[in-house]
Amino acid sequence: MNVVVKTQPFSLPPLPYDEGALEPTISKRTMGFHYGKHHATYVKKLNELVAGTPFADQKLDDIIKATYLDAGKAEIFNNAAQAWNHTIFWACLSPKGGIAKGQLATALERDLGGYEKFKEEFVKAGADHFGSGWVWLVSDKGKLSIETGHDAVTPLAQRKTCILTIDLWEHAYYLDYQNNREGFLKQVSDKLLNWDFARQNFERAG
Ligand code: FE
């Protein structure tokens, strides 16, 4: 008997490190829920929503751009963008941490007052953001800025390049930091940001 295994169009990408690798800043328990439940559910729901539609054959970033601000497709946008945002977020973190270097360090100096000032403003923007969402370092044609977006909103949909991001949804920090979002943002910004990944994003954007 032949068994046909149907693969869904989108799959949950593997984490770039073990679930416990970011401890103590982010616990293994948080990663287990965040990656294994929340991120996985966005991917699963997206597959259900696009099944049998033309979106099933499209790339994730094309779906995000095509459904942004389309009220009739908000559910597809939300799940597609959350699937993409989380994959980027995992890549923005590294147990090794680091600091900004190269062209990106120069651009941070020029546009945002330098690496230390950037971290301060990034944490503040994320802490001040009301409700769920994301804080982003973005490049718009080489110019850097800090932005926040509500819920699933992503700079990718606005044709900007994502350099770094941190998840502001409570599921990202509540088990470890309870209501102290600012503390979570500060710890992650100081210890876990993957500046090699950020530099690659910036240099690729040109
Ligand atoms: Fe999340």
Image (spheres, grey):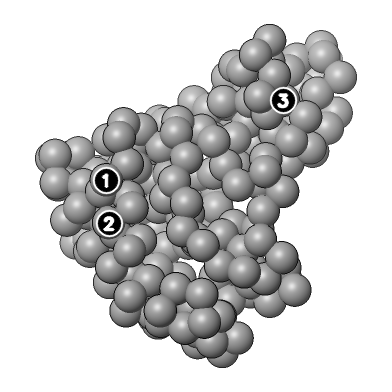
Residue 150: x and y in percent read 44, 33
**Residue 47 appears in view:** no
Q: CA distance from mark 1 to mark 3?
A: 28 Å
- Which comes sooner in the sequence, label 1 or label 3? 3
Q: Point out the image quarter for the N terminus.
A: top right
Left or right of residue 72, residue 128 in this image: left
1 or 3: mark nearer the eye: 1
Is there CB contact under 8 Å for labels 1 and 2? yes
Q: Secondary structure at mark 3?
A: helix
| Residue at screen point 40% across, 30% down | 37
For residue 110, above or below residue 204:
below
| Residue at screen point 49% across, 25% down | 41
The residue labelled by disc 2 is 124
Q: In the image, what residue type sits under mark 2? A: Lys
Q: Nearer the viewer, residue 167 or 26?
A: 167
Is there CB contact under 8 Å for labels 1 and 3? no
Left or right of residue 149, residue 173 in this image: left
Q: Secondary structure at mark 1?
A: helix
Q: Nearer the viewer, residue 126 or 29?
A: 126
Q: Which label is found at residue 77?
A: none
Q: CA distance from mark 1 to mark 2?
A: 6 Å
- Which comes sooner in the sequence, label 2 or label 3? 3
Q: CA distance from mark 2 to mark 3?
A: 30 Å
Q: Which label is found at residue 67?
A: 3
Left or right of residue 7, residue 185 in this image: left
Q: In the image, what residue type sits under mark 1? A: Asp
Q: Give the quadrant of residue 25.
A: bottom left
For residue 29, above or below residue 52:
below
Q: In the image, what residue type sits under mark 3? A: Thr
Residue 33: x and y in percent read 33, 36
The residue labelled by disc 1 is 128
Q: Nearer the viewer, residue 182 or 81?
A: 182
